[in-house]
Each structure stands twice: as C-alpha cells, then as structure tokens.
Image (cartoon, rainbow, N blue to C red):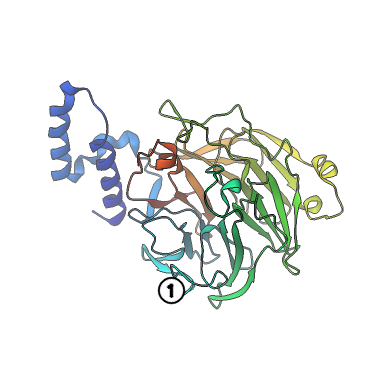
Amino acid sequence: MDKNERAQTELALFCFKNSTLPKRYRIMKKSLLSLICCFSLILPVMSQTIDPRLEVVATFGESQPIGVSVSSDNRVFVSFPKRQPYVYGLTEIVAGERKPFPDAAWNAVEGKAEEHFVNVQDIYVDTNDQLWVLDSKPASSGSIFGSSDKGPKAGQFKMVQIDLGTNQVKRVYTFDDLDKTKSGLNDVRIDTEKGLAYFSDPGQAAIIVMDLKSGRSRKALANSEFTLADSTIVLQFDGEDMVDHHDKPFSSNVNGIALTKDNKWFYFKPINAKKLYRIATEYLADPKLTDAELAKHVEDMGEVGITHGLAADKENNIYLTTSLDYTVRRLKPDGKIEILAQDSRILWPDSMGVGSDGYLYFSCAQMHLLPHWNYGANKLIFPFGVYRVKVL
C-alpha cells in the first residue's frame, strides 16, 4: 500500500469508527471495523466517500494547513496558522514531507515580528516566481472568529516577498497605513504587470490595493453590496448551523479572491454570499476612481453558491471550493460550472494553487469542525491534509 492509499485508509477508518449507529448495529459495526483494520483491501466497501480523482499530496497530523501555492516548476508550498500543535508557519513539501521555508529562523515560535512569521494566513506565487507570504494576525474586531473584549486592540500584519530563485527574503511590507484595529487581511494576489498587490479584507469588508514600490495601500469597494456578507445566509453542516458559543453564526465578508494569469481580471466574493463578482484590474488599479465609480465596473458572474477559496489558471478558468457538498468546481470562460472532485475528505477546502503539471493543489482547513464553532467540542478529523486533482 503506497502513501496515498495509507492516508486514505487512515481517514476512512477514522470516519467509520467515529460514526454514530443505532445500538442494534454496534456489534455489526465492531466486527466490520475489525475486518477493515486487518484487511486494508476492504477499503472499497467505503468507496462512496472516496473520489478516485483526488490524490493525497501530504498529511500533517494535527497541524492545520491554510495557504497553498505552487511555483512554475511545481514546488509546492503550504502555510500553517499559529495554532497548536505548531511546527512551522511556512513550508515547502519535499517528497511528501514539510520543510521549513525559507529557513528555520523565519519559522521560530518567538522572535522579532519583522524577522519571523507571527501567523501565516495566505501565500501566493506570482508569474515571476516570487512567493508572497501574508502574515496576518487580526485583532478580534477584524477576525472572522468574532469580536471580543479580550486580546490586543490592533492586529499584526506584514507581507514577505521571497525570491524562489535564491530562496531569500527580498522585502518585508508592514502596512503602515492600514487600520489595524478593524482589518482582517485574508488572501493576497499579485499583479506583476502593474506592480500591485490585491488583498481581501473581511474585517473592513473591502479590497485592499497596495503599491509594491511605495508600500502604500488603499481601500476599494468598502462595505459595498459586492464585499458584504449576506446576513440571511447561515452555513449548515449535517443539519447544524455553524455558530459560536453565543449562537452567533459564522459570517465572512469578502474572502476568496482570484487574479487571472494575464493580470486582467480580479474575481472576488464573500463566503456568506452566492454570487461571484469580477472587475477589470485597469479600474481597480486606478486610485482616482471613487468606490461609486468602481462599482459601475463590477460584473456579476452569477450564482456559484457558498465558496471558500478561489484560484485562476492560464486558461482563465476559475476554481471554486466548498465544503457544503464536499466539492472542487471549475467555472469555465463560457460560464459553465463543472465538478472536478467530490469527496468526504474535502472539508473546508481553503487555498489553492495550479501547477504547470496540470494539477490543482488545495488545503482542507476544517474550519467548521474547530471547537469555536461546536460549543467547545473538537470535531477535527486527523490527519489534516493537502490534496490535488488533475485539471489540465
């Protein structure tokens, strides 16, 4: 049995072992579990939960992966927020194992904020093979976990540029003009043609545009119909609302974003919304346009349902992920949506990267299974993993 099959077996056994059955079936369940443990080839009995198109790239035990990106020569990078058990913030996956990147010092648990990762949220490899690392630790007022009187009143934010040719840090951006009491920087995309970075900021319900030369940033489309969550939409899993211990539903303003490889179109949407939007970057890049003027250039791409991550490939396909029906989908330029994979392991698929090898790589963060959204109960399914599916 290879590594991919072992990981599938481990997860399938966990799901089966932790399922709930009526009392009269428990003896039968125990017998079946024993057989599965002894004879791994019985795995096909559970084939309805496994999509053969889905491949395991790496597993991480109890460490939660968030960001995923892939270089032009198919180097795979995965980031992890600073939650326990914490090992590294940013890694490169080599032969299925994670290695600290760019080195161990940047991944130290403690250190100067400008010289180590505080809480890596998202990563993105641009068309020039520069790896951009969004290190984002919002204050509670800007966090998707909700406001609280506890903790610092201002968040910590920086972006680190790493040259993949030398594996060296080139520059650190510190967002000096960002409202760190409200911001919740979530995803980043880099426009190599215009020298701009685009960020989703659910905390401010805005898109943040940064000039990479000066480091100055500005808000765009703040609190608009395109960036605000729909308050009537409550995510449900297995018939249960996703709420915190105060019964407040999970809600995220603009979150997933994608930039086409030709740098012409920027796609975005809140998690708690069904419509996908896009705007030509020529307008988003223009600092002279007001939000009202920008709004006239936003295009409604129609309903795509609840989604988490977004990504674009060289053919201008847009990839969308959702854990509501355990799928990874593709929106084609002709407007058709197709399912690329549907698998019970696709639990809150978060960040994606498209390799030149024709695979879409993505993480499964299992956000909805965290104790915060389950009245303190930890429902996470281990091991966490990063997966891939052939798309090109």
Label 1 packing within 10 angstroms: few (<14), some (14-19), many (20+)? some
- Is 222 left or right of 329, judged from the image as shown? right
Residue in the image at 48% along x and 51% along y: 362
Q: Is residue 347 visible?
A: no
Q: Quadrant of residue 128?
A: bottom right
Q: Position of residue 344 (x, y in %)?
A: 38, 38
Q: Position of residue 20 (x, y in %)?
A: 26, 29
Q: Is residue 230 above or below residue 83?
A: above
Q: Total number of numbered labels?
A: 1
Q: Position of residue 74 (x, y in %)?
A: 49, 64
In front of the other: 361 or 225: 225
Residue in the image at 43% along x and 69% along y: 100
Q: Is residue 311 above or below residue 302?
A: below
Q: Is residue 141 visible?
A: yes
- Is 12 left or right of 79, judged from the image as shown? left
In front of the other: 293 or 126: 293
Q: Is residue 215 above or below residue 234?
A: below
In front of the other: 320 or 185: 185
Q: Quadrant of residue 144?
A: top right
Q: Is residue 362 above or below residue 166?
A: above
Residue in the image at 46% along x and 63% along y: 89
Q: Position of residue 116 (x, y in %)?
A: 51, 70
User: Would you name the residue on which mark 1 appears?
Assistant: 104
Q: Amino acid at mark 1?
A: Ala
- Is 295 left or right of 27, judged from the image as shown? right
Where disc 1 sits, the SS reads: loop
